[in-house]
Amino acid sequence: MGIGVGLTLVALGAIFAFALDFSLSGVDVNAIGWILMVCGAASIAFTLLYLRPRRAVVPVSEEDAAALRRAEEIRAEENRRDGIL
């Protein structure tokens, strides 16, 4: 579910809870409205949690980047020597 579905549920729930003034036998329209609003809010919260960045971006210093490049060069050279590549 996306944010649009959550907002739709909240809007429909608000209409049922606050705007409609009728009753059905055995059905509490007001309670259905509140349930829809809670489900919509939960949908929005879960969507925002799901879409947030998974992990922080950590800047790499020049020394670390140079060491990583050198390690990759050594690994590639060893692979060529061993006949892997």
Image (cartoon, grey):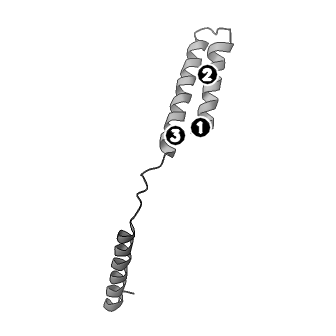
Q: Is residue 69 above or below residue 52?
A: below
Image mark for residue 48? 3
As measured in the structure, the alpha-carbon distance from the residue carrying label 1 to the one carrying label 3 is 8 Å
Name the foreground residue: 76 vs 22: 76
Q: Secondary structure at mark 2?
A: helix
Which numbered disc flags the more N-terminal residue, 2 or 1? Answer: 1
Which numbered disc flags the more N-terminal residue, 3 or 2? Answer: 2
Q: Is residue 54 above or below residue 23?
A: below
Contact flag, marks 1 and 3 (Cβ < 8 Å): yes
Q: Which residue is mark 1?
A: 3
Q: Quadrant of residue 32?
A: top right
Q: Residue at image x 42%, y 52%?
A: 56
Q: Secondary structure at mark 1?
A: helix
Q: Which residue is mark 2?
A: 13
Q: Position of residue 84 (x, y in %)?
A: 36, 86
Which numbered disc flags the more N-terminal residue, 1 or 3? Answer: 1
Q: Residue at image x 62%, y 31%?
A: 7
Q: Residue at image x 38%, y 76%?
A: 69
